[in-house]
Image (cartoon, rainbow, N blue to C red):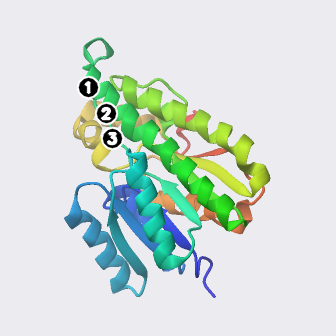
Amino acid sequence: MKRFENKIVLVTGAGRGIGASIAKRFASEGAEVIVNYSGNDEAAQKTVDEITATGGQAQKYKCSVNDSESVKVMIDEIIKKFGRIDILVNNAGIIKRCDAIDVPKQDWDSVINVNLNMVFLLCQAFAKQYVKQGDGGKIINVCSMLSFQGGIRVPAYTASKSAVMGLTKALANEWASKGIQVNAIAPGYMATNNTSQLRSDADRSEDILDRIPAGRWGTPEDMQGAAVFLASKASDYVNGYTVAVDGGWLAR
């Protein structure tokens, strides 16, 4: 029997990058994966097709997860179809680069809304369902190196990801007694769309690589192991913790 057989997993922002990689790994370990997305139908379908092509189980679900009513409808439909839900991976996020002194309020609000507000709404909604089910559940939030550091020209992103790490601890404190583990993963510098500007800047990319002991940019596949661990029974006594997957960046 595979590790996550009969488990229902929802991964937000699973159309590409880290989310797609994590979704594929859960499917390969027997889970039924719900590929959540908000806009790019083609990318979400590609993730589903790649999973089913290798014998996995997945389906896409479009939902604006920063709207509490839409989230409730999504969870109700998942429960109606599968009878339960077991694991939430809060991966979806956006980044906008701008000098702090020039950041438009609209950009600030959009980053905070997607990266923080929607994370809380999903955590809250899933926790309510876990309590109804009566046997706990797993929540994995995706943070960032900028949960630990200030960064440059990404003030809203840094604020949101720092808040998610704090929120992870706060929710773990409240929900541990209900059998709910809330943890987080902080990816280091990953070769994804969010870092394309950094990687195209030869000097900045070189500076980043010089600090990473592993000597390379991370890949979405590097995130799989931490996600699987935090979703498994092996992590039942781990709560409120943020695992850095950074090639040693924070050790420098």
Outermost residue, top side? 101
For mark 2, what is the residue? Answer: 110
Assign a secondary structure to mark 3: loop
Q: Amino acid at mark 1?
A: Gln
Q: Nearer the viewer, residue 77 or 252?
A: 77
Task: Decide: is 214 above or below 89.
Answer: above
| Residue at 44%, 28% in the rendered image | 158
CA separation, marks 2 and 3?
A: 8 Å
| Residue at 73%, 41% in the rendered image | 173
Q: Are marks 2 and 3 in contact (CB under 8 Å)?
A: yes
Q: Amino acid at mark 3?
A: Ile
Q: Nearer the viewer, mark 1 or mark 3?
A: 1
How many other residues sit within 10 Å of disc 3, few (<14), some (14-19) or many (≥20)? some
Q: Are marks 1 and 2 in contact (CB under 8 Å)?
A: yes
Q: Nearer the viewer, residue 61 or 108?
A: 61
For mark 3, what is the residue? Answer: 94
CA separation, marks 1 and 3?
A: 13 Å
Q: Nearer the viewer, mark 2 or mark 3?
A: 2
CA separation, marks 1 and 2?
A: 6 Å
Residue 71 visible within the image? yes
Q: Amino acid at mark 2?
A: Ser
Left or right position of 50 against 235: left
| Residue at 36%, 83% in the rendered image | 52
| Residue at 26%, 71% in the rendered image | 45
How many other residues sit within 10 Å of disc 1, few (<14), some (14-19) or many (≥20)? few
Q: Based on the displayed image, in which of its 4 quarters is residue 95 positioned?
A: top left
- Sequence-wise, the earlier of marks 2 and 3 is 3
Res. 106 mark: 1
Assign a secondary structure to mark 1: helix
Left or right position of 117 against 205: right
